């Protein structure tokens, strides 16, 4: 089959239309050939602005030897992960299971029934660091398919079974209430991983921690409204968020000249980025910086406001179609090299700034020999990544403006002009938060002119059915516009779009990423964890809550309780939504009224001891409908156990056994008591924590009195 990518609308697939590899798009025709000819499939997944995707393309997919090996033994399918994120997620999970890490380009070898039997990311052309080159890998897999088919198929079946299990991504914990203490625990977990010097979490490489930043900022603004003194946790949360944003804004990951932010930093200081610019990164950073501006110190606020204005400048100048909607990405490479467009020489700066060049170069760390090294050789290139080392002054801001208006020192990178609904929704929301309501409303109106919400627009044409994040992010954006403009029409549009969430609903709580109209390979996923963008289920819960469907929002967040408990660093969007749900009036009214109805009685209260001086009674606890209390040995360490304290008598309590770690409806605690001295009176204090299915109240005490005659 000849290369069929020339007819594609995807900028990424079009980059490969002239490869000698006989690429096929992911479609029925390609898979039919694999089945009919009994050939395995080589699936290569990437995206247009990915630097390492370009590296593998130049090394291997443009190479005749590699192409010949692939074409001889495989049906070769090229996939744009941004067009089909459902397929990408399935096989990226396979790569993570096989290698322990993920990334793009993704290279997966599949049976004709779509089951993986070998999974990797970038494969070098030549053997390197103990890893075989791609021709060796391809020939070995082709030989195994021809000579050891039964073993390959068996391994593929086992791999597919493990993959299907992993795709469910369910964790125990959904039956336990999630509480304000989960918020506190997540902040503690973030603090343990916090880079106190450079901001962010963990070591290199560093990606902007979008979900963590928004959770921390919401935690700061709302935690003290939720009761139970959090101590200094809000102060620590504020410092983590603001220090991280300040360091990101200072670093080379920030395009100080033309605005916006690169995808991630290869070092721990945010100085050396990979240079692709993604709409979704900049949307989330715009929202975080806009929120942080309300909480920042004056010194930080100037830098934060510069970051906000830079993102909007970049968006208007480089990423907005003539219709006013937003394109996906700018490439990492320019003129065949990474980062050329963003890395000036000292002479480039001198020609633009004249006498100001020396001060500018000192302030932004530019050197004549350059500070940017070739990734392969480590040699200095003479080019520089700008990173701000001091304070941002009026003069430096003017210098940056002059540089942005000067002729570019390199050709602009290629742009991926497809427009993805979910990413546009994130950007519309962020623009509203930044005060750019007119720009946001113009984009939203264009999406509303379509007959239905698609996954994306390519060259102005609707393409693909929407995924869960497309629907939820756009509905959330409409609600932001409704609040900003006071327009009821935007709220009605949000309600209409939110009705489509039913297409993604599971029989158990939570939403699938794909609708009933999609046909993803090897099963549907139910995404609760954050990735490069917020958890789609968290976005759905946010929309439901804002539309007043609080019970449905609670149910969705509770379905992710296992992730909140066991992987808080991957669940910050759920935690952010939990922060708001705990503040909802319905929740506060329910928990406040019900807890007061827990009743405790002693039966009997007046006791007659036996011949050995022991008296026996029962402490009976009765809970109203919708309330339970934790047992004496609750299911989680952070839950407060039910305990009995005896004053004025010797005694012991026998607590009822339970496998669930909770008492529902009622509980009877058997007491054995003996007088202490001459006094007949004794007191029983029972301490308990009352919970609904979604929240636990602060611990309560009830005191009862009795006598031993």
Image (tube, helix red, strand yellow):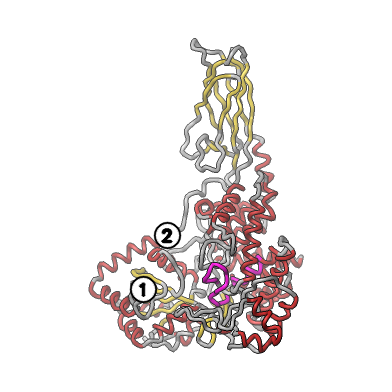
Kindly identify which residue carries mark 1. 129
Quadrant of the image for the N terminus? bottom left
Kindly identify which residue carries mark 2. 166
Label 2 element class: helix
Q: Is residue 58 visible?
A: yes
Between residues 494 and 693, which one lies in front from this camera angle?
Answer: 693
Q: Is residue 617 above or below residue 241?
A: above
Q: Quadrant of residue 284?
A: bottom right
Residue drawn at point x = 57 percent, y = 52 percent:
188
Dot 2 or dot 1, earlier in sequence = 1
Q: Is residue 455 above or below residue 523?
A: below
Label 1 element class: loop
Residue drawn at point x = 59 percent, y = 38 percent:
689
Kindly report which numbered mark, 2 or 1, lies closer to the viewer in this rendering. Answer: 1
Between residues 649 and 602, which one lies in front from this camera angle?
Answer: 649
Q: Is residue 417 visible?
A: no
Q: Position of residue 425 (x, y in %)?
A: 63, 70
Question: Which residue range is magenta in the image?
Answer: 264-288
Find the residue positioned furthest to the top.
611
Q: Is residue 432 left or right of residue 273?
A: right
Q: Is residue 674 left or right of residue 484?
A: left
Q: Position of residue 89 (x, y in %)?
A: 47, 67
């Amino acid at each position: 089959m000849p290369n069929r990518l020339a007819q594609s609308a995807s900028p990424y697939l079009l980059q490969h239309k002239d490869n000698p590899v006989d690429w096929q798009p992911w479609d029925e025709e390609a898979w039919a050939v694999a089945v009919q000819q009994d050939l395995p499939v080589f699936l290569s997944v990437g995206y247009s602005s990915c630097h390492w995707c370009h590296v593998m393309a130049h090394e291997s997919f443009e190479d005749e030897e590699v192409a010949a090996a692939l074409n001889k033994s495989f049906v070769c399918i090229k996939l744009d992960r941004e067009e089909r994120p459902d397929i990408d997620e399935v096989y990226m999970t396979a790569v993570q299971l096989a290698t322990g890490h993920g990334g793009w380009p993704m290279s997966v070898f599949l049976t004709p029934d779509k089951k993986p039997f070998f999974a990797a990311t970038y494969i070098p052309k030549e053997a390197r660091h103990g890893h075989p080159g791609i021709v060796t890998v391809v020939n070995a897999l082709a030989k195994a398919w021809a000579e050891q088919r039964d073993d390959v198929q068996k391994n593929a079946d086992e791999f597919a079974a493990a993959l299907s299990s992993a795709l469910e991504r369910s964790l125990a914990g959904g039956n336990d209430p999630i509480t304000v203490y989960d918020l506190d625990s997540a902040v503690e977990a973030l603090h343990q991983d916090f880079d106190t010097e450079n901001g962010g979490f963990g070591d290199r490489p560093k990606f902007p921690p979008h979900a963590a930043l928004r959770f921390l900022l919401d935690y700061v603004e709302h935690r003290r409204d939720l009761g139970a003194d959090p101590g200094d946790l809000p102060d620590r949360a504020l410092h983590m968020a603001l220090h991280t944003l300040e360091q990101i804004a200072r670093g080379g990951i920030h395009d100080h000249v033309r605005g916006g932010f690169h995808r991630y930093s290869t070092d721990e200081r945010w100085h050396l980025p990979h240079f692709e610019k993604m709409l979704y990164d900049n949307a989330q950073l715009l929202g975080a910086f806009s929120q942080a501006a309300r909480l920042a110190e004056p010194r930080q606020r100037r830098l934060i406001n510069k970051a906000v204005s830079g993102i909007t400048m970049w968006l208007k100048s480089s990423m907005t179609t003539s219709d006013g909607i937003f394109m996906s990405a700018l490439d990492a490479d320019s003129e065949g090299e990474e980062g050329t467009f963003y890395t000036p020489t000292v002479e480039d700066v001198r020609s633009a700034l004249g006498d100001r060049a020396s001060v500018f170069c000192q302030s932004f760390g530019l050197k004549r020999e350059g500070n940017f090294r070739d990734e392969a050789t480590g040699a200095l290139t003479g080019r520089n990544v700008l990173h701000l080392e001091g304070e941002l002054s009026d003069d430096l801001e003017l210098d940056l403006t002059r540089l942005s208006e000067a002729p570019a020192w390199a050709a602009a990178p290629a742009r991926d002009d497809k427009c993805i609904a979910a990413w546009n929704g994130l950007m519309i929301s962020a623009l509203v938060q930044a005060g750019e309501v007119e720009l946001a409303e113009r984009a939203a109106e264009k999406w509303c002119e379509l007959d239905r919400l698609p996954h994306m627009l390519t060259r102005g044409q609707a393409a693909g059915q929407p995924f869960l994040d497309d629907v939820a992010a756009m509905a959330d954006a409409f609600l932001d516009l409704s609040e900003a403009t006071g327009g009821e029409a935007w709220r009605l549009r949000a309600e209409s779009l939110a009705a489509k969430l039913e297409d993604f609903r599971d029989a158990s709580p939570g939403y699938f990423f794909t609708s009933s109209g999609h046909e993803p390979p090897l099963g549907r996923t139910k995404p609760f964890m954050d990735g490069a963008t917020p958890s789609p289920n968290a976005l759905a819960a946010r929309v439901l809550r804002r539309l007043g469907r609080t019970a449905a929002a609670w149910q969705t967040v509770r379905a992710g309780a296992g992730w909140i408990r066991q992987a808080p660093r991957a669940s910050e969007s759920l935690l952010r939504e939990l922060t708001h749900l705990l503040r909802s009036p319905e929740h506060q009214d329910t928990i406040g009224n019900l807890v007061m109805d827990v009743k405790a009685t002693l039966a009997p209260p007046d006791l007659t001891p036996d011949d050995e001086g022991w008296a026996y009674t029962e402490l009976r606890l009765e809970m109203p409908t919708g309330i339970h209390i934790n047992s004496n040995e609750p299911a989680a360490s952070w839950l407060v156990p039910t305990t009995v304290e005896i004053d004025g008598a010797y005694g012991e309590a026998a607590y009822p056994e339970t496998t669930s770690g909770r008492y529902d409806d009622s509980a009877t605690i058997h007491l054995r008591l003996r007088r202490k001295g001459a006094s007949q009176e004794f007191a029983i204090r029972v301490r308990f924590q009352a919970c609904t299915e979604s929240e636990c109240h602060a611990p309560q005490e009830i005191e009862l009195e009795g006598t031993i005659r």
